[in-house]
Image: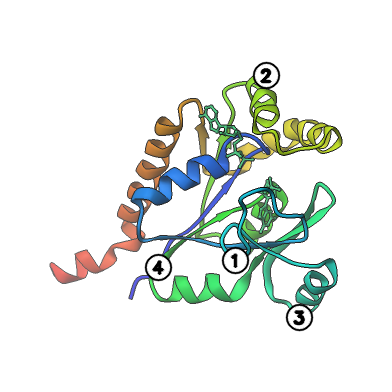
Amino acid sequence: MKEGLLVVISGASGTGKGTVCKKLFETEKKLAFSVSATTRAPREGEVDGVNYWFLKKERFEEMIEAGEFLEWAKVYDNYYGTPLKKVEERLKNGEDILLEIDTQGALNVMEKMPKGVFIFLLPPSLAELKRRIEGRGTETEESLKKRLGAAKGEIALGEKYQYLVVNDEIENAVKSIKNILKAEKLKSERNLNLLEELK
Ligand code: ADP
Ligand code: 5GP
């Protein structure tokens, strides 16, 4: 059985990761979303166990202690982390899984799981990024400032990823990500069985 693909998508807050991933999941039925744990409060419409596992700080810290995270990070004053067990189980079963995580977390995953596919989503411009976060209307003035303040530093880390995708039009970004996944699946190292069968 071939191991599934571990796909990591990062990008500055407001770039459109959530929007692009949602669209991607509409057609990529075999791709699973890794539901992260977080200590931040749910936004309107967010459902526990679907968008995130919303946890109290104490519970999150217990999970860190118990080694239950593949990675975790403090992002804008809250904890965020990827539960390890689900990721391991899925990959072992040959299922692909997508992690939508921040740059600190992604750099940790690059070390632990170098076979992963690392994609960085970029906004078309910083002005458009600001418009998108403001337009989403989910942040307080303080949180907005933090997210914009962190954006340039996060974007600079884009060079560590294998792929850079600009989210100009949602459809374009989704198409690019689908192309990346298709190419990754065709890599020779994942398909050596084809050569064996023809020997
Ligand atoms: P992230 O998950 O990266 O923080 P979101 O998916 O929440 O970002 O998107 C931030 C805002 O930008 C949302 O209001 C969303 O509707 C909007 N948005 C996302 N992608 C695009 C796009 N390609 N063009 C215009 N607006 C977009
Ligand atoms: P938001 O609060 O806007 O949902 O997410 C804030 C940031 O946390 C985003 O950059 C998002 O990708 C990141 N994030 C979400 N889940 C995780 C996770 O499990 N681990 C890490 N390291 N970052 C995460």
Q: Position of residue 94 (x, y in %)?
A: 38, 71
Indicate left or right for 148 with 24 as reference: right
The CA span between labels 2 and 4 is 38 Å
Q: Residue shown at 42%/42% (left/top)?
A: 177
Residue wearing tag 4: 95
Q: Position of residue 32 (x, y in %)?
A: 45, 61
Which label sits in the foreground, 3 or 1? Answer: 1
In the picture, residue 173 is in which quadrant? top left
Number of disc labels:
4
Q: Earlier in the sequence, mark 1 or mark 2?
A: 1
Indicate left or right for 32 with 69 as reference: left
Instruction: Tell me if residue 174 comes above or below residue 88 in the rendering.
Output: above
Quadrant location of the N terminus? Answer: bottom left
Q: Secondary structure at mark 4?
A: loop
The local crowd at label 4, few if under 14, some if 14 to 19, many if 20 or more residues have their Cα within 10 Å, is some
Residue wearing tag 1: 49
Q: Residue furthest front?
A: 44
Q: Secondary structure at mark 3?
A: loop
Instruction: Tell me if residue 188 comes above or below residue 147 in the rendering.
Output: below
The local crowd at label 1, few if under 14, some if 14 to 19, many if 20 or more residues have their Cα within 10 Å, is few
Q: Earlier in the sequence, mark 4 or mark 1?
A: 1
Identify the disc placed on residue 127. 2
* Residue sitting nearer the eye, 16 or 198: 16
Q: Position of residue 23 (x, y in %)?
A: 43, 43
The local crowd at label 2, few if under 14, some if 14 to 19, many if 20 or more residues have their Cα within 10 Å, is few
Residue wearing tag 3: 66
Which label sits in the foreground, 4 or 1? Answer: 1
